[in-house]
Image (cartoon, rainbow, N blue to C red):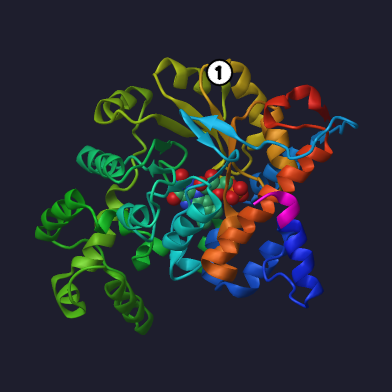
Amino acid sequence: MRALHWQRKIYLDGFAGKIPAIPANSIQLEQAAVRKMTPEATAYILGGAGNEQTVVDNRQGFEHWQIVPRMLRNVENPDLRIELLGQQLPSPLLLAPIGVLEMAHPLADLAVARAAVTTGVPYIFSNQASVSMEACSAVMGEQMRLFQLYWSRSRDLVTSFVNRAEACGCRAIVLTLDTTMLGWRTQDLALGHLPFLHGKGLAQYTSDPVFQQLLDDFLQQPPTARPSVTATTLRHLIGAVRRYPTGSFLKNLRSGRAMGAISLFSGIYSNPALTWVDLAFLREQTSLPILLKGILHPDDARKAVDYGMNGVIVSTHGGRQVDGSISAIEALPGVVAAVNGQLPILLDSGIRGGADVIKALALGAKAVCLGRPYVYGLALGGQEGVETVIRNLLADLELTLGLSGYKSLAELNPDCLRPV
Ligand code: FNR
């Protein structure tokens, strides 16, 4: 839908007394979602690492650049189309991989997958999804999807995830590099709450044949340390067993399968020993393009080229991993210079409005990924909430592009901006 139609619809609805349920302003959107979500969901979704300075800097970094609008240049119907990985896309927007969406809404990834279809925006499935990639793909038809991989300690599991991603029509593997360990997430720590321990965000694992085989082996071993048994432990245990997707509650409780899956996941999901050399293994497993997510240093960007990768995503993981790290938008020019046009560069972390997208593209990104805002839309209104957040952002982008004097994204370059 073109920006002016969407804008007019909102005003006409308002004229008829219908005020939007999903705020157009990103700060108000976040505040509305916080009012709706549980304290645990709020901590997990909003929270960053440490003192959350990088969460702040991801936003402030955009303020170091200003658009200098141009006039009288015929900007009717600005063109938002781009080409990425050989695909024509209607806009430079993708949905970032976000885990444990069941904390925001019961339909979780499925609602997002459907919203991706109705808005024509590609969706990067999370390795920590609440709904399996097969179930999401089944509602997406031809709509572009990608799979985000966390490289676990089991290479067989890595291979299995990648094979499944290929089989269900994903167009690329997004390998997230910045989470070889979980960051020091102070809001989650304050509540002593980690969703995975409650069996949330494990759908890609519990639906995987290799993981199930690993679980069979794991359950043969003597159990390791268990938390002390209190009424709360029992309540959480029952919740986790209920969440296990297959088999009866009693069978899963008695066999220890549900809790075993959580323990096994905790032991293998990440692999801090990974190095650049390991990428050759992934390359052998798939013919899909591989994008590296979490690149911030120009030297790493150059290595991505040297190691035959197909793209990079400049990202701080939304400030959730290294507190005090450079913000994504400030890292972008260095990465762009290092890559020198040899790979497409995407950016996430702090995209909250059309102007942010314009600044990222003017500085050399090909596309951007939207993160937390669509989760706020999901929390507030399920599929429709996600659709509204996406439509708002695209309308804002189209209008801001045209009002800045550009008829297409291809016209953007660093001279469109002024450093502050
Ligand atoms: C994430 N992100 C993330 N990244 C990833 O590669 N795999 C994942 O499973 C997740 N999960 C996840 C959960 C939550 C609650 C958040 C907020 C983020 C990071 C995500 O893809 C993206 O990099 C950030 O969300 C970008 O920052 P902003 O713009 O959302 O602040």
Residue lying farthest to the left in this orientation: 220
| Nearer the observer, 106 or 119 | 119
* Res. 18 in view: yes
The local crowd at label 1, few if under 14, some if 14 to 19, many if 20 or more residues have their Cα within 10 Å, is many
* Res. 352 in view: no
Residue 315: horizontal and vertical position, in percent? Answer: 56, 38
Residue lying farthest to the bottom in this orientation: 231
Residue identifier under label 1: 339
Secondary structure mostly seen in magenta is helix
| Nearer the observer, 374 or 278 | 374
Residue lying farthest to the right in this orientation: 71
| Nearer the observer, 311 or 306 | 311
Q: Residue at x 22, y 63 (%)?
A: 260
| Nearer the observer, 204 or 193 | 204
* Quarter placement of the C terminus: top right
Is-magenta flag for residue 243? no
Q: Residue at x 64, y 29 (%)?
A: 332
Residue 391: horizontal and vertical position, in percent? Answer: 64, 54
Q: Residue at x 43, y 68 (%)?
A: 107
First to last magenta residue range: 1-5
Q: Secondary structure at mark 1?
A: helix
Q: Amino acid at mark 1?
A: Val
Is-magenta flag for residue 3? yes
Q: Residue at x 41, y 50 (%)?
A: 126
Residue 416: horizontal and vertical position, in percent? Answer: 80, 27
- The quarter of the picture where residue 73 lies is top right
Residue 138: horizontal and vertical position, in percent? Answer: 33, 55
